[in-house]
Amino acid sequence: MARTTGSDGARTEDAIRQAAIALIAERGFEAMTLRELARRVGVQPGSIYRYFPSKGRMLVELLLDHLRFLLEHWQRERPGTDDPVERLRAFVDFHVRSHTLRRREVFVANMELRSLAPADYRKVVALRRRYEDILTEILRDGVERGAFRVPDARVAAFAVLAMLTGVGTWFREDGRLGKHELVAQYTRLVMQCVGAAHDDTAPATRHRQHRRPD
Amino acid sequence: MARTTGSDGARTEDAIRQAAIALIAERGFEAMTLRELARRVGVQPGSIYRYFPSKGRMLVELLLDHLRFLLEHWQRERPGTDDPVERLRAFVDFHVRSHTLRRREVFVANMELRSLAPADYRKVVALRRRYEDILTEILRDGVERGAFRVPDARVAAFAVLAMLTGVGTWFREDGRLGKHELVAQYTRLVMQCVGAAHDDTAPATRHRQHRRPD
Amino acid sequence: MARTTGSDGARTEDAIRQAAIALIAERGFEAMTLRELARRVGVQPGSIYRYFPSKGRMLVELLLDHLRFLLEHWQRERPGTDDPVERLRAFVDFHVRSHTLRRREVFVANMELRSLAPADYRKVVALRRRYEDILTEILRDGVERGAFRVPDARVAAFAVLAMLTGVGTWFREDGRLGKHELVAQYTRLVMQCVGAAHDDTAPATRHRQHRRPD
Amino acid sequence: MARTTGSDGARTEDAIRQAAIALIAERGFEAMTLRELARRVGVQPGSIYRYFPSKGRMLVELLLDHLRFLLEHWQRERPGTDDPVERLRAFVDFHVRSHTLRRREVFVANMELRSLAPADYRKVVALRRRYEDILTEILRDGVERGAFRVPDARVAAFAVLAMLTGVGTWFREDGRLGKHELVAQYTRLVMQCVGAAHDDTAPATRHRQHRRPD
DNA sequence: TATGAATGAGAATTCATTCAT
DNA sequence: CATGAATGAATTCTCATTCAT
């Protein structure tokens, strides 16, 4: 077959990106083959090279895109207030929502750093660091203002991020727990964790206290 | 050459296991080649097959060994008391210590589940589940006795495990933070997280409040 | 280099098939290596996998092709008559000619059944059985009509086929015996063997009675 | 384990030979591995080298042994008479019996000539030639005395040998046809084939004329 | 823009063989 | 006589990548 009438580069590139994220999340970057990627997209392996100069570059671009997406969206959605509790609440909400919505991207970004070439690794980690800094800064500020009580803001930030990001490992969109409920539970856990003087009378967590999964 | 003088099966197997864990942690299972593994051990690639029937079986055996190690050691070291706070404190201590001591095994066990054949995957996950259940059980018991306050013991267990396990990602044996201090900080974070009626006047965390990593 | 100018799938596949038959006939299927096959064809070993999914599938396809070739050609060339002697004569002629013309295919088909996977083995043997049945049927019919005298048509068919097929083992295109003469001698032997009321005064065999190969 | 008390070289060697013939017949010489052979015999692969200097030498020895066995036994069993018909009858009987009794040896000897090193090939073929010559000589003598009518004794010898040897391909010890009956049928086919002035009133073939396998 | 034929390097794995014990 | 640890070369097969069309 020659060229499909109306075939369209932008559409093809997008299809490749989507399929690549899915495939890498499923199999891992090293285990994914361009052959299979091409098969899923419905093109020949060679065609991928119109859009990405190499398998490795494809990974970096996907990861950078994801991290830029996170940073930009946070920029847009973060609350105007400077109340640490409100800011933390917003961050948890943002993080849990984006990390369940874009589960595969998050998973890939967490698993495949090893597969990056050193220079790419540095770029990606720098962006990730900026994201971590958002939380560190919120915690640090909260500690200073007496809103939170943790021995070390950076350690606490790592702990909280690990906790929050871990949600992607087990949460299923179609599982027992609704996403709203999920956010509520994690918000409470985080608040307790950082020693927020909690008003844990928030309704969402309250009326479920008797529920118990598994 | 047929056989290096004094060569010894048990020793060789051990050397392969050690090197394999290190190499998989470094590069990832798929990216690791048996050639390189053999080179590090100082044998020919084919010799690995005296000890493992395939690359895939090697991975399972390493993972199962690691999980069995964790379960057995917890069995031996867990405290006799049934006070939830004491049990949780012991678990955090055990987990953080074993997860910093056997960092690479932990890392591999968390990253390479994907690379397992389905049947092996099930075996490994079953063991991991038993480990998770230890913490779930402690939390559930604590909630019932009023020692902890979390909306859902299982969700909290996942959250706490993610938090604790994440320590392996950034903690360096030779870094700023001592292991003792590390355990102290995580203990406090976990206690707060599960809403333990805290006696957080513990000295270890106190006199460091002004310190700040990174 | 990506692609030799003017390279052409159909041509390459044919070259591989030809070379494969020759090489398997020479060395045996197990002893043949894809490296050597590729070298003879003038491509890289990996390129063979564009045309055959595995070494094993290559063998089946070659054997099935050969047997289909035999069956189809017999279908086209078999005589319209129902006189058993004429039919047998035509079969011997067809068999000896095709088995000297396609010596290597025949040889491979006889030697390499063992190397087939069980499922493939069944397919190939089923086709071979259809070929054997052609002769069995001719003999059976001839026995019923009183044209041949053998105790058991199926046993005789095996005996005659073995005899005829054996010709490929020793006959050389450039040897003492012409192909025409060869067919004549085998026709006579077969006719005698099945007890045909022979008119063995056929000239072809006559004027050579004093010749002696080897 | 050290050495089994009373373990015995001659016994081991014999076990290896037996197993080797069986395994080569099953899989083919190239496809057989010394590992599997050793496993069947119950020794370690290295131990085989006490008895055979290499895999290749093992094959030659097995083939030479087999051919020597055939020649010696014929020497002992051949009839004293010089009547061509009697001699041919005895040969057919001997050949069919030995080729069904030692099926696997025969099969191996026919299939694996290719796997021999050139020098070994020559030795084996020379012995086989001596065996073929026995039949050629009988036929030639019979033609001269007017007992047989074939255009060329050597061609007929090849044809008859192929026919007779083919029996090993399909005959099953536990099948429909008894061995006695088998010999009788082949004797008759051969006699007819060489144009022996037949007294085909021999009882063995007669009273079965109505039988029909398959 | 896309194909499909081909490459070449390297992967896991197998195997005959060796030899200290 | 036999073992078992090890070798080294080779095997099938895979894969990222190239490029004429």
Image (cartoon, coloured by chain):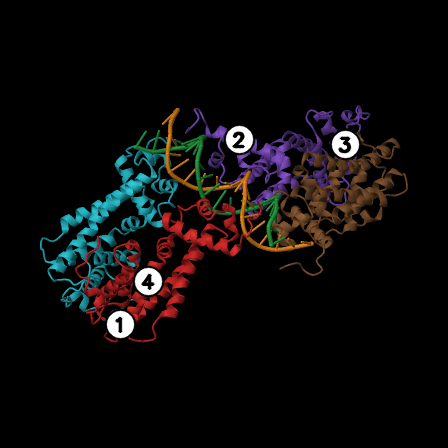
Chain colours: A cyan, B red, C purple, D brown, E green, F orange
Q: Amino acid at mark 3?
A: Val
- Identify the residue under disc 1: B85
- Identify the residue under disc 3: D155
Q: In the displayed structure, would residue A146 be above or below residue D117?
A: below
Q: Amino acid at mark 4?
A: Arg
- Quadrant containing the N terminus of chain D is bottom right
Which of discs 3 and 1 lies nearer the camera? The answer is: 1
Where is residue B206 shown, x and y percent of the image? 19, 65
CB atoms at circles 3 and 1 under 8 Å apart? no
Q: Is residue C137 visible?
A: no
How far is mark 3 from mark 4, CA to CA? 86 Å
Residue under mark 1: which chain is it in? Answer: B
Q: Amino acid at mark 1?
A: Val
How far is mark 4 from mark 1, CA to CA? 18 Å
| Crowding at mark 1 (Cα within 10 Å: few <14, some 14-19, many 20+) | some
- Nearer to me, A56 or E4: A56
- Identify the residue under disc 2: C39
Element under label 1? helix
- Identify the image quadrant of residue C145: top right
- Identify the image quadrant of residue D55: top right
Q: Earlier in the sequence, mark 4 or mark 1?
A: 1
Residue under mark 4: which chain is it in? Answer: B
At 80% from the left edge and 29% from the top edge, which residue is drawn? D151
Where is residue C152 shown, x and y percent of the image? 74, 45
How far is mark 4 from mark 2, CA to CA? 58 Å
- Identify the residue under disc 4: B97
Q: In the displayed structure, would residue C129 be above or below residue A183?
A: above
Q: Is residue C124 visible?
A: yes
Residue farthest to the right?
A: D81
Element under label 3? helix
Q: Amino acid at mark 2?
A: Arg
How far is mark 3 from mark 2, CA to CA? 38 Å
